[in-house]
Amino acid sequence: MELKEIASDLKFPEGPLAMENGDFLICEVAGGTIRRVGRDGKVSLLAEPGGAPSGLAFGPDGYCYVCNGGIGDFQQQNGRLLPHFAPAVPPRGSIQRLDVETGKIEPLYTECDGRPLIAPNDLVIDAHGGIWFTDHGKVRRDDRDHGALYYAKTDGSLIRRMIAPLLGPNGVALSPDGARVYVAETPTARVWRFDLAGPGEIARSPEAVLGSRGHLLAGLGGWQWLDSMKVDAEGWVCVATLFNGGITAISPDGRQIEHHAMPDRFTTNLAFGGADLRTAFIVLSSLGKIVAARWPRPGLRLNHAR
């Protein structure tokens, strides 16, 4: 793919969110900030939520919702900024609500049924205004806190733990018809499919695993991990791939797999934009860059895009 550099000198960028006016928003996980990248490439500060913001999505009320992992731990290595094992600290993750006009940000959810959120990572908002989000959990030297898939409402009235435990759940996305939710597990390099029976309701199936609700869409072999994802208009699941740096695109039936290589082992996310949604804004996190490329298929317009 021919790549065009859009922005650079970012502190481990993640969570790109393309806007219809040609701007896009980006999190700096290692900087605790959210920035706006203009159509002219100018980068400006939008908000300083602190912690480790990593996922963004607009809701039906016009606010932007933020996954904040609470704390990140990074180190410089050969001119690149890389994550490593997190220190043993109490969970401090949250879902936050951001006013993109003023930069005001406030917590929406910090716990579920009395259990603190650990490290919310990625989110997608359905047509009904419900937030599907992953909590990645935490890895330490000798043990880990497992993660989970959650469903919550943007008005703050409901949060439910839907699937647990999951091993490092990261990317989450919806199919074009909104009838399936996909989740990528980072260290297993697996993408799971969950069929929906209604808003915030996962259907049960005798063929499913993970509590009779999960179907394996694809499992990638070799030394590669999975990060965040988007779905294109034809239903291909496009998941950022670590170590085997790039974007892996998986057909809706899981039978075809494409790998689009990128010049960073820590390619962590992408967003679709442009007038025809054929521009993929791809995040090269350890290089601190965002690049644009022409995608083979149109991207899927997100619910509540603005």
Image (tube, rainbow, N blue to C red):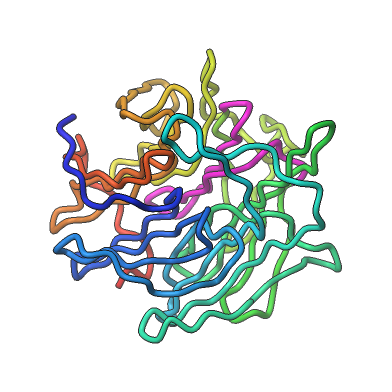
Q: Nearer the viewer, residue 298 or 197?
A: 298
232 left or right of 217 in image? left
Q: Residue at x 50, y 59 (%)?
A: 31
Q: Nearer the viewer, residue 241 or 87?
A: 87
Displayed quadrant of residue 5: top left
Q: Nearer the viewer, residue 152 or 292?
A: 292
Q: Residue at x 37, y 21 (%)?
A: 256
13 left or right of 4 in image? right
Could you tell me residue 45's position as x and y percent? 37, 71
Could you tell me residue 154's position as x and y percent? 56, 75
Q: Which residues are magenta?
A: 164-189
Q: Residue at x 38, y 37 (%)?
A: 238
Could you tell me residue 104's position as x and y percent? 48, 84
Displayed quadrant of residue 142: top right
Examine the rendering and report whether any part of residue 176 can be seen.
yes
Could you tell me residue 226's position as x and y percent? 52, 33
Residue 238 belongs to magenta span: no
Q: Nearer the viewer, residue 49 or 293?
A: 49
Examine the rendering and report whether any part of residue 231 can be seen.
no
Q: Residue at x 57, y 28 (%)?
A: 190
